[in-house]
Amino acid sequence: MAILVIIAGAAAAYLMGSIPTGYLIVKGLKGLDIRSVGSGNIGATNVKRVLGLKWFFGVLFLDALKGFLPVLAVKLLFPQYQFLPVIAALCAVLGHTFTIFLNFKGGKGVATGLGVFLALAPLSVICSLASFVIILFMFKYISLGSIVAAVLLPAFVFIFGENGFLNLVLLFAVFTAVFVVYKHKENINRLREGTESKFTVKSEKKEDAAKPEIKKKAGKK
């Protein structure tokens, strides 16, 4: 019975995490494949280039929600399996970054990671989110804010004692930090070179956002 619960919980979390929110919204509203626009990423930052700021927040919320819901569900439904929320969290993040619906190519896991940790370690996430906002306000780089927030998350989990069963939450926070930094390796190179695009509240010109040839060559997140 326990094995079936673990498998079902992990599979459900992966499938929910795999829902390519940004891809579906851009495809539905503009008829464009978000993977051929801007950075080619399916996350909120690239969606903003096509649909504007309100959809940046919309996709960010939905990507976080698809991480939050499965973790919260297994915590409430199966409290006897204290390790299951961490397994569900891992599967949701992997689902977003390696989505089955887009040939196992997805986003960078930041928003979905935010969602799973809101369910696992809410106080730590609030502090990491505050760090993200501060870095974004100071330097205007979403990628830099995401990296700093991810790296600080394990420290906050440790400080506030939100370690969970056998410190699994802390271990998962460390894994998430390493994973997020790895997924942002191209952004790190662009930050070093001074070519990373800064976040603005204004949308980019539609004609620029619609050009497939700027994918991954324009130095954007």
Image (cartoon, rainbow, N blue to C red):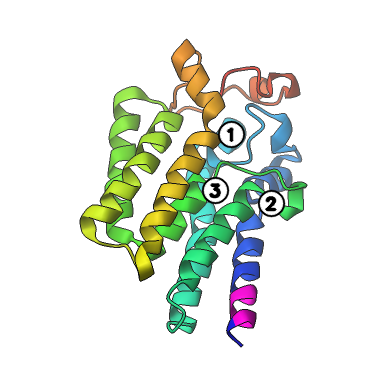
Q: Which mark is residue 99?
A: 2
Quick one: quadrant of the C terminus?
A: top right
Give the residue displayed 44% in from the left and 55% down from the top: 172
Q: Which mark is residue 59?
A: 3
SS of the residue at dot 3?
Answer: helix
Disc 3 and disc 2: Cα gap in Å?
Answer: 16 Å
Determine whether 6 is above or below 206 in the image. below
Relative side of 78 to 40, left or right = left
Percent coordinates x, y for residue 204 in the rendering: 56, 24
The residue at the point 41 percent across, 55 percent down is 171
Mark 2 residue element:
loop
On the image, the x and y values in percent for residue 106 come to 66, 44
Name which residue type carries label 1. Asn
**Amino acid type at image mark 2:** Thr
Specify which label sits upstream in the sequence, 2 or 1: 1
- Find residue 46 and name its label: 1
Secondary structure beneath label 1: helix
For the N terminus, the image quarter is bottom right
Is residue 129 visible in this depiction of the protein? no
In the picture, measured across the screen, residue 37 lies left or right of residue 54, that is right
The stretch of residues the image draws in magenta is 3-8
Report which quarter residue 140 is drawn in: top left
Q: Which amino acid type corresponds to the residue marked 3 in the rendered image?
A: Val
Question: Going by the picture, which residue comes out furthest to the top?
Answer: 193
Q: Position of residue 191 (x, y in %)?
A: 45, 19
Dividing the picture into quadrants, the one containing residue 158 is: bottom left
